[in-house]
Each structure stands twice: as structure tokens, then as C-alpha cells.
Image: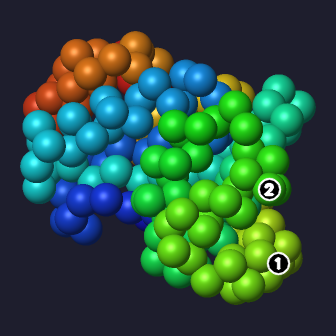
Amino acid sequence: MKQLGDHVKGPPGADLVLVEYSDFQSPYSAEVVDVIDELLKSFGGKLRFVFRHFPQPGVHEYALSGALAAEAAARQKKFWAMYRVLFRNQVALDRETILTFAEDLDLDLSQFEQDLDSELTLRRVQRGVLLGEKQGVNRTPTFFINDVKYEGGTDFESLAGALEDALRGGSKKLVA
């Protein structure tokens, strides 16, 4: 189910909804970026992808700053562009580097910095974490297919198989 503030690709009436809880410094989350693109192409109008923040600052030093940067970019309609930049450069997500990314994306830097530091931006990130915790998320990436937790592999074949099974009404590697 879509929540206020989710970042979404795909049609609202799609038969399949794939929700990902993710951390911009998680190498495993970075590995699925291209997989998600491939799934969206493969399933076309049948799939809706929902991204939710689940930064793990205890594990990744710049996880929270990455999430805040993505949300600040979203305020200027550049979430998905920043999403790609952050995952491609996930080792260095300090403030100076993030500001360089914002400049490269032609964002209004003054507005970006204001949004980066705003309480509203922090609350949007925290909302994803709270939703994830309620659903039992404890690592990234964690996926849900049509509101059911997915426990299989994160490669294209595994996720596509689970999505196909969900289309048929099955529950391949899904946990209630």
C-alpha cells in the first residue's frame, strides 16, 4: 500500500506492488538498482515500485545523510536522479560530496541545503524507518510483494519468479 511521501515508479492500478526498504550505503541495496529497472521493463504496467528509506547509521556512517539528500532532492522533483547518483557513489556521502551531487543535478543549492537540514525532511526519512520496523524490516534491502514480505534472492530471476507467482496468486518465498 502506498504511503504519503513514498517514491514510486509504475502505474497506480498495477497488479503487483514491490516495496523496497533501502539504505543508500548498503552495497546490497546498490546491487538491486539495475534489477529494479529490469523488473519494471519486464513487467511493464503490471508492476509498481515503491522505495522507502531504511538508513542504518549504526552500520553505515553516511546512511542518514544519503537519505536526507534524496529527500531534499525530491523537494525539487529530482529524487530518482539523486537516487542513482547516491547508489553509484555510496562510499562518499559526506555533506561536501552531497552538495557537489546537488550542483551536478542543477538543483537550487540554497533550497537544497535548507531542505537537507529541515525537520520535515528528517521526519520523512524517519517515517520509512518506522513503517519498516512495524513490518519487521531489519536489513537492507528488504522487499514486500503486495504487502507480503519476500524472503528470496535479490537477483532478477528470483524476484521476477516471485512476482510471476504473485500474479498467479501463489506465495513463492513470501512470508505472511
Q: Nearer the viewer, mark 2 or mark 1?
A: 2
Colour option used = rainbow
Identify residue type, mark 2: Glu
Residue type at tag 1: Ser
Circle count: 2
* Residue at horizontal 52 percent and vertical 58 percent from the top: 82
Residue, x 60% and y 68% (percent of image)?
A: 103
Q: Which mark is residue 96?
A: 2
Q: Is residue 74 visible?
A: no
Q: Residue 120's quadrant in the figure?
A: bottom right
* Residue 35 visible (yes or no): yes
Q: Position of residue 27 (x, y in %)?
A: 59, 23
- Among the two numbered marks 2 and 1 on one chain, the one whose residue lies closer to the N terminus: 2
Q: Among all residues in the image, which is located at the extreme right?
A: 58
For label 2, the SS is helix
Q: Quadrant of residue 154?
A: top left
**Residue in front for this viewpoint, 75 or 156:** 75
Left or right of 98: which side holds 147? left
Residue 84 percent across, percent down from the top left: 46, 48
Label 2: how many Cα within 10 Å (few below 14, some 14–19, many 20+): few
Q: Give whichever of 133, 64 is nearer the camera.
A: 64
* Mark carried by residue 107: none
* In-front residue for pair 90/150: 90
Tag of residue 118: 1
Crowd tier of the residue under label 1, counting other residues whose Cα lies within 10 Å: few below 14, some 14–19, many 20 or above:
few
Q: CA distance from mark 2 to mark 1?
A: 17 Å
Residue that appears at 68% across and 79% down: 109
Is 122 left or right of 167, judged from the image as shown? right
Q: In terms of depth relative to the viewer, which is nearer, 23 or 84? A: 84
Q: Position of residue 29 (x, y in %)?
A: 53, 30
Q: Is residue 51 left or right of residue 66?
A: left
Give the vertical position of 158 relative to 22 (above or below). above
